[in-house]
Amino acid sequence: METLKHDLISIRDLSREDIDFLLREAQRLKEGKPLHTLKDKKVASLFFEDSTRTRVSFETAAASLGGYVNGFSSAEGTSVKKGEPLADTVRMFAGYGYDALVMRHNLEGSARFAADVLEIPVINGGDGSNGHPSQTLLDLLTISSAHERIDGLKIALVGDLKYGRTVHSLLQALEHYDAEVWLTAPELVKMPEWRVADYRQHTSRDVKNIESLSEVVRNVDVLYMTRIQRERFPEGLEGQMEYERISNIYRLTPELLQEAKEKMIILHPLPRYKTQLENSLGVDKLPQAHYLNQAQQGLFMRQALLHHLLLGHWFSGKPKTVSEPESQWEELSIPDGTKKGERMVYRLDNGTVIDHIEESQGKKVLEALGLRDYHETPLILAQSLSSDRYGRKDVIGVQNRELTEQELSILALVSARARVNIVRDGRVVRKGKIVPPAVVERLVQCQNRKCVTFPDNYEHAPSKFYVEEREPLLLRCHYCEEPVGRERMKLVC
Ligand code: NCD
């Protein structure tokens, strides 16, 4: 039987059943003695970025199940320092016969990219500011151990919600639970709007933005504190000043916590800063402080993950499915085989007329289609024509040529209104609106500079987007998960 390769890259890959299954499995491992289920298995632990808990708990988890672990704990001393691309580094470990790879990297989408180039399971131990799914699973384990449920709780995420990957994954996971999410962050590091929009869209619930930490303390059942991610701020003086401006805004102290509910728990993915402790040392002694215990839960959750990923017993294990449109064309009827308006502007006997392009977008469409060389492809661009339907429109006529499938896809991406007419011997033989494909590969450039596909990062990851909505168009980067609409979309040229 062919076994599917399973990775843990994003919380988005998991259903509620998957998460609940893993919580039960980790609980089972916590209560029992680990069996040597990973005997003869090799786990690569590749930490291109600093880590204490995630790396050591994964490595300890693998070793406690009888597995062999090797890798590196920083790029220092490896060929990464010589400028090696990520794909080469990870491929080599697969080549040495490793059975799984755990990785942390500063680029967003790096783990997804590694998973795409490898045949072995990949676990994301943190990809830049994007996500940290195994941390979220251990966070949920801590919450459900303390409260015996996740549904019905009020959960506040506090601190750096912009750059903090743990809170990004946690917010995604909370979509599956009937919890109330409160967000508390300095203006400069608020939760990105698109992440909140995703939460709203997937749950039909809203988050609560609360400025006052004491209000949070008085009300919530879980207070998830985070460190301001200094290393992700822009380099130089400006970044330094931004960081200093916000680094001390939210701080938990025993005094502030006096009004907390007795059963409230404080979590923190750790590390915390020794110079400006966001959870002061006095808090450690309070019954609400669960963060040290939280880190310990990581061992059991990571045992559960390694066990199931390596042995191929994945939970529901559904690969991502995309629904391709039935046809690239949404056919429109052809009234009488000709088009009066076009005849007034030009006469095209054979070729393609792209009609109803948004006013002043004609040039952009030509550019997107690579039809800049007017000599090579005889064509007509008519701008700002009057249109009964839209007031004004641009029209393009391409002589003696029909558009390829790829060109039609590009057209559907750049223009919402365009209608394509295929003309043969002076008659329109096909007319329709072009439907964007389900997956857009190598056509659109992700605008997130930290994305593994961004050209300046030189990882040579091919761009890939899923079409989440066709109208209005919304694409989602396969790697860094950022959405992009038509207005901000940039084509790869
Ligand atoms: C977090 C991380 O690396 O994202 N730590 C962790 O994995 N336990 C949080 C942080 O670095 O602040």
Image (cartoon, rainbow, N blue to C red):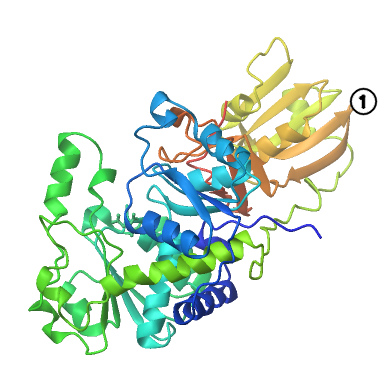
Q: Which quarter shows the N terminus?
A: bottom right
Tell me the amino acid under the disc marked 1: Asp
- Which image quadrant is residue 361 in? top right
Image quadrant, ligand 1 = bottom left
* Spot occupied by residue 184 in the image (x, y as percentages of width and height): 25, 67
The answer to whether residue 158 is above or below residue 108 is below
Image quarter (top left, top right, bottom left or bottom right) of the C terminus = top right
Q: Residue furthest right?
A: 425
Q: What's the residue at 65%, 42% (across, down)? A: 440
Task: Report if residue 206 is visible in the image.
Answer: no
- Above or below residue 234? Residue 171 is below
- In screen coordinates, is 70 left or right of 260? right
User: From the viewer's perspective, is 177 left or right of 280?
Assistant: right
**Does residue 279 lie above or below 73 as drawn?**
below
Question: Horizontally, is 127 left or right of 330 in the view?
Answer: left
For the point 14% across and 75% down, the residue is: 283
| Nearest the eye: 343 or 19 | 19
Question: Which x, y percent locates residue 401?
Answer: 81, 23
Depth order, front residue of 350/473: 473
Q: Residues within 10 Å of mark 1 (few under 14, many from 20)?
A: few
What residue did someone put label 1 on? 425
Q: Is mark 1 within 8 Å of ligand 1?
A: no
Can you name the residue that lies furthest to the top here? 375
SS at mark 1 in the image: loop
